[in-house]
Structure formats: C-alpha cells, structure tokens
Amino acid sequence: MKANCAGHRLPRRFFNRPTLTVARELLGKRLVKMEDRNVRLSGIINETEAYIGTDDLGCHARAGETKRNAAMWGEPGHCYVYFTYGMHWMLNFVCEAAGFPAAVLIRGITPQESLSLMRQRRKRPTNRELTDGPAKLCQALAIDRSFDGYDLCQSTSSLFVEEVNLDRRFTVTVGPRVGLNNVPEPWKSIPWRFRISLEKQDVTNDKRTRRNE
C-alpha cells in the first residue's frame, strides 16, 4: 500500500526525558516503517513497558553494559533490538541521557497501513492478533537485529514515530510488566506497563489517514 499520510516525526527531545513519561506518551503515536517503492507499514502504539537503569532487576542493564545491550547506553531516540527465546525480536526505544541505560519496549500496535503485507509476513489471513505483541509486530514490520542502534530521529530514517491526530483521548491502563516471573519484587510487580484500547473506528478516524488497507 502507498499512502500519503505522513505526520510530524517525533524529535530526539521527545525521547530525552524520563522513561516513564516517554512510555506513557508514546501511546497513540504512530510507528512507521518505510520500505521499497515508498510503501508504508504502520500502526498506532497501544502498549508499552518501561525499563530503567541498572537498579531495575527486570532490565537488561542490571548486569552492566554488554555487546548485546550496548544500545541502551547510547543517545536517546535510537533503537535497542534484542533476540529472545531463540526465535523472537523485540523493539525498544532508548530514552534519557546518553550513558544512562533506559528504554521503552513497544509491546503492541493497532495496524493501520499495509495490513496485507503484515498478514503475509505473519501468515495470518485476518487482522486478529496481527500485531498485539512485541514479537508479532517485529515480524509484521520485518524488524530484526539490523535495527539495533538505529536512529529514529533522522529526517531520512526509514523507521520512526510520528504524531497522530485522533478524534478522542484515551484512558491509559497501568499495570505490571509481562514475563518477569523470575524477577524479585518490587521489580516483578512494579506498574511500568501502559496500555490503551483502540477500536477500528478510532484508527480510521485519524485525520491524516482514512485508509487502512
């Protein structure tokens, strides 16, 4: 699909703020990946999780800087992409000042553009459960290790986040992060996961995008 629905890209200063603020304010923004022939794949971010510093025992930074997590120590507005369970890629956005390891995991998006291509990659005939998980959205958007350290904020970046003009505000649900079963308290249950519920009409009512196929 080719759609003329570009919005304002989020600048680096958006990410150079407290991680919890960024995690909450990413909700309702649009994640976009540009591919060959100006094809746009996109979705509205509907779920995020915050991971903050070496004291956070649920965070990959807890053991210090390694080759795998080095991007977390970098400049805000870059990607941290890691491989998990021997099969899944996970997309995170680095936050706060360089030298302090913090990032927001993008847990889910409501698909908006190029759904047919996403279905092909996910081997899903319908939109149900297409991008409602961090591994699923990476598969749908073809995001892998090559995006680790990628700069979201350059004007020429093919992966970025942009503002969205939706018709109404949404209630944010806050809760514990997912999958930290072996992490001790308080980190296991700390309420650093943020979600909103988006219906199809909410997405298609975006004043910049009227088509979703």
Image (tube, rainbow, N blue to C red):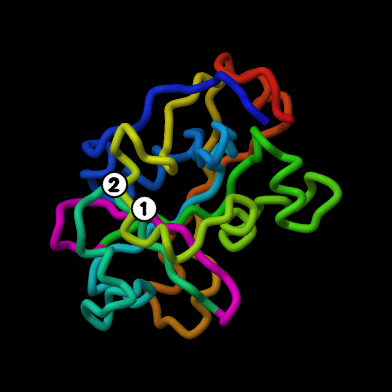
15 left or right, relative to 38: left
The residue at the point 42 percent across, 62 percent down is 146
For the residue pair 157 and 69, the one nearer the viewer reads as 157
65 left or right, relative to 146: left
Return the x and y of residue 134 as percentages of the image width and height. Answer: 56, 59
The answer to which quarter of the image holds residue 158 is: top left
Discs 2, 1 touching: Cβ within 8 Å? yes
Return the x and y of residue 96 as percentages of the image width and height. Answer: 21, 51
Picture disc at residue 123? none
166 left or right, relative to 56: right
The residue at the point 52 percent across, 57 percent down is 143
Identify the element where label 2 is drawn: loop
**Figure label count:** 2
The answer to which quarter of the image holds residue 201 is: top right
Q: Earlier in the sequence, mark 2 or mark 1?
A: 2
Few, some or many C-alpha atoms within 10 Å of disc 1 (few <14, some 14-19, many ≥20)?
many
Which residue is denoted by mark 1 in the rendering? Answer: 93
The magenta segment is 85-101
96 vs 30: above or below? below
Identify the element where label 1 is drawn: strand
Which residue is denoted by mark 2 in the rendering? Answer: 77
